[in-house]
Image (cartoon, rainbow, N blue to C red):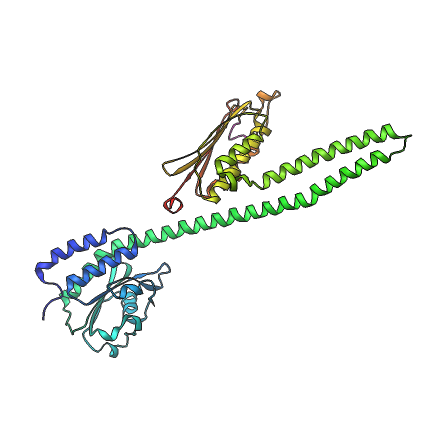
Amino acid sequence: MRGLVEPDREVALLLDIVAATSSGPGLEVMAAAAARMITAATASDVCFVHVLDDTDRSLTLVGATPPFDEQVGRIRLPLGSGVSGWVASHRQPVVITDNKEADPRYVPIGSLRGSDFTSMASVPMETEPGGLVGVLNVHTVQQRNFTARDVELLLVIGRLIAGALHQGRLHRQLMARERAHENFAEQVIEAQEVERRRLAGDIHDGISQRLVTLTYRLDAAARAVDEENSAEAAEQIAKSREMVGLTLEEARSAISGLRPPVLEDLGLAGGLASLATSIPQVDLKLELADDRLPEHIEVALYRIAQECLQNVVKHSHASVASLRFSVCDHVARLEVADDGIGFDTGQSTVSGDGPRDRVAKPAGYGMLSMTERAELVGGQLSIQSSPASGTTVSVKVPLNAALRA
């Protein structure tokens, strides 16, 4: 009987395997190339490449020759089920020359039209030291006797393919984790923004409206006060109105901080420029690139900048600060620097008498909150500061291929 591969074709086959396994990191693309190559090289009629799923409990069809390539991703076999499942569980090859239905291990799969093929050989695909990646099957319409040499060659092919498929499997798992992280970050940030919008609405509809109503009532009280106590009453009413005005201003400021509509209208650069106008206490220099980023990243960077600028006003005693945003080499960068009093990053107290002699509390810079926001979008935040030398807060967020698409 003719062997699976002619002797003078074996070296060429190995070169074909190298080409197939170099077709790219995509698991399905690599498996499809391998299936076509094996079918042509072995003069078989069809080849199926099954790979362990991420649970290591079942096999998934990831590569097949036409017309069965339409079934890729749809066929799943639990370990131990069918010939392929048996091979995966026992790490041993199986050869069926004819009458597959009589083999107790055989389970027909209608979409793969098993009854159209007479003979088959199924071998495990393993990587050193013995890690199972999947199962490789070849089928023929005409009866074929697979020799021990044929099986050994298929095992060698399986081992060569297994290494590349294992790398493709790891790549797929990594991409899935990255997508899951991005989705989680988007959902968390969106949930935070929804809650902020709710609080802003509550403040506007509740506290702010009541303060406005109180102002009207104080005006009415001022007009209705008795002449005898008019001077003292007017003074008290004036002070109350002043307090209401300050409280209303704080409420409006809180609403503005909770809900930044400028991001939707102007993007991150416009939002940061608008944010800078709310910091009149410091001479703020801006360098803002007009690049748009995914919404959840823009929100995270905006919130970090907001926290930084609030800290500049509240804690730094700075006279000059800078706000920079740029995108270069697929990395978004945000930097807020000031010439304030700075702090010892390992210190937790405030010391000194004069403003320039004081040392700000690291906790006052909201490092934990800003760090969590940066990490949530896959970025990294760093703070450089020392007493009397100012503070620089930097954020770097890599923009991976999914975000750039």
Is residue 89 in view? yes
Where is residue 35 drawn, in percent x and y?
Answer: 22, 61
Residue 72, above or below 95:
above
Report the span colored magenta: 343-347
Horizontal and vertical percent position of residue 238: 79, 30
Q: How many marks?
A: 0
Q: Residue 251 in the image: state x and y as whole percent.
A: 66, 38
Residue at 76% in and 39% down: 214
Left or right: where does residue 241 sit relative to residue 272?
A: right
Closer to us: 45 or 136: 45
Q: Would you say 5 lies left or right of 400 here?
A: left
User: Is 11 colored magenta in this rendering?
Assistant: no
The residue lying toward the viewer, choosing from 221 and 14, is 221
In this view, 386 is above or below 248: above
239 relative position to 140: left or right: right
Front in this rendered view, residue 260 or 306: 260
Identify the residue at image location x=51%, y=41%: 299
The N terminus lies in quadrant = bottom left
Q: Quadrant of residue 226?
A: top right
Q: Judge from the rendering whether residue 99 lies leftward or rightward of residue 89; answer left or right.
A: left
Farthest left residue in view? 8
Q: Measured from the top left, where is residue 186 in percent x and y?
A: 48, 48
Magenta residue check for 346: yes
User: Can residue 368 be seen here?
Assistant: no
Dominant SS of magenta comes to loop
Q: Is residue 302 above or below residue 83?
A: above
Residue at 66% in and 43% down? 204
Vertical comparison of 71 with 184: above or below: below
